[in-house]
Image (cartoon, grey):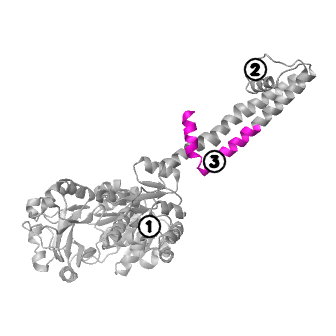
Amino acid sequence: MKFVGSQLAYYMDDRDFKKNSKILLKYLALLGAVIIIFSILFHLIMGIEGQDHSWVTGFYWTLTVMSTLGFGDITFASDLGRAFSIVVLLSGIFMLLIVLPFAFIRHFYVPLLESKNKNKVPRQTPTGTKNHILICSYDVIARDLTERFKQEGTPYYVIENDLEKALKNYDNQVPVLFGELDNKETFSLANIKDAKLILVNRGDIVNTKIILTIREIAPTIPIIAIAADIDSVDVQQLSGADHVLPLKKWLGEQLANRVNAQHAKSQPIGQYEDLLIAELPIHNTPLVSKIIRETNLRQDFGISIVGIWERGRLQPITGHEKLTHDSVLVIIGNKKQLHNIDEIFHDYNVNPNPVLLIGAGSVGSAAAESLYKNGVLVNVVDKDPEVCKKVSPFCNQVFVGDASDYKLLKRAGIMEAPSVLLSTHDDTMNIYLASYCRQLNKELRIVSRISEARNIDIIHKAGANFVLSYSNLGSEAVLSISKGQELTVLGEGITLFIIRIPQSLEGKSLAESGIGAKTGLSVIALKEKSEVLTRLSPDTILPKGAEIVLLGTIEMKREFNKIYVKAD
């Protein structure tokens, strides 16, 4: 009771708690009125029987009968009195033993606990919070994004309007603020005017409402919005969003860029300064079976090889790696250099057969349209006739049916296709199809989307060459915008890190630093003042005050910080 009393004063400001408390008080008032009426009737009937009792005795009898205690020290002698006793007893059972406990729990105890939980989750950022990032939903993109924020030490807060989700996030150590997303006070308490940016990642309709709410109190705060439907991009931009990301369309286009089709060609996937980062499949080219040092790409074209994709694994470069048909080089160079290498490799890896696309939903249709614009023939397999009808303008042929049907896949061209693109929204199905397609065609390049990060290793083992998820693409896009950089999508879990050279590495050569051997990161460039150096060798010195551009995973970057940054 001491706990309840201390909490009451704290939670009386809670609107729901006060509302429920009023209901309970009304019931208690009704109960008190019934007790008074029964006490008055007790005196009247006792007077008829010739008995005289005090008012205290009347209340005493009424409460003992209603509570079913029934001490028996005061009784009626007449049938009228006994009938009245029965009415009081039954009323007591209903009002005291049934309704009162229910009313207490429903309108006091439960609201008290809910009020306590509501006050458990913060509603505002700590005093002095600045340059933080606000996120409107802790979805798959936010989970991927916050891992990067933790790594980089960027403050962030997730705004949640669902109490259950807010409590779950709070208990999981996620910095969360509880509040309604269409309430200006929520964003004022989140100190939005001093925030770095806000990510609006709810549904398209809700996003528009949130953006309009934010713009009323923070006209200049950068707003990044996620658009599920390409048609909603303009609406969200007109509502006040600075950047609207049609991620499903982008995911389809990024997957389309990774297929092998027509001829060998470098595919730009990102940019650093005036240099392009690109992938170069070498399947059926003269580079197969050569050692990296023997390719002479730097000497002949001026480009640098900074990594190799081998069945979904990005391998750092030592110069001694032997290239295979499955190798995809990650290269860096300017536009002219990439154009020159494309002309040399143009006649290799020719396969005129259509690419096979399985799953033609939002992502699949975007991939089909992208391939169509690039002059690549596409055969589509999907169960839904309506979906197939919608994507048919961009396809060579459409096959309606189950992709696990061998006869259907064979008619769709699985045996001759240069690549298959798996874009169903089911990870389990994509894993199954990757394994199935790999068994049917060993030379096939398999490109797939994925939803859950835990399935990445599994689908690579199943045979996928390249995997990309919606969450990774979204987090990379938001990070690129927040840093004012070009979007670089290297692959699932692989990203570009640009950091100032730690003091512990200043003056050392790349060979002495041991960055690749100790962390697995690839050093792809150095920037000193305005000069960018990509022709790196083991003897390249890491100068003081320069920037170093690294390629790898978050775990590799974390290891880099542990070894080199904390050593300063």
Q: Which residue occupies the foreground of this view, 424 or 178? A: 178
* Crowdedness near tag 3: few (<14), some (14–19) or many (≥20) residues, C-alpha within 10 Å: some
Q: Is residue 15 visible?
A: yes
Q: Earlier in the sequence, mark 1 or mark 3?
A: 3
In this view, the residue in front, 257 or 23, is 23
Residue 61 sits in which quadrant?
top right
- Please name the residue that numbered disc 3 is placed on: 18
Segment tinted magenta in the rendering: 1-30
Q: Quadrant of residue 197?
A: bottom left
Considering only order in the chain, which callout, 3 or 2, is on the residue closer to the N terminus? Answer: 3
Amino acid type indicated by mark 1: Lys
Question: Considering depth in this image, is 84 or 399 the residue closer to the camera?
Answer: 84
Q: Quadrant of the N terminus?
A: top right
Q: Specify the quadrant that holds the C terminus.
A: bottom left
In space, the residues marked 2 and 3 are separated at their CA atoms by: 36 Å
- The Cα atoms of the two marked residues, 2 and 1, are separated by 67 Å
Q: Nearer the viewer, residue 42 or 483?
A: 42
In the image, residue 276 sits, relative to residue 317, either above or below, namely below
* Mark sitting on residue 70: 2
Residue indicated by mark 1: 193
Q: Quadrant of residue 79?
A: top right
Whether tag 2 and tag 3 are in contact, CB under 8 A, the answer is: no
Mark 2 or mark 1, which is nearer to you? 1
Q: Is residue 373 left or right of residue 563?
A: right
Assign a secondary structure to mark 1.
Answer: helix
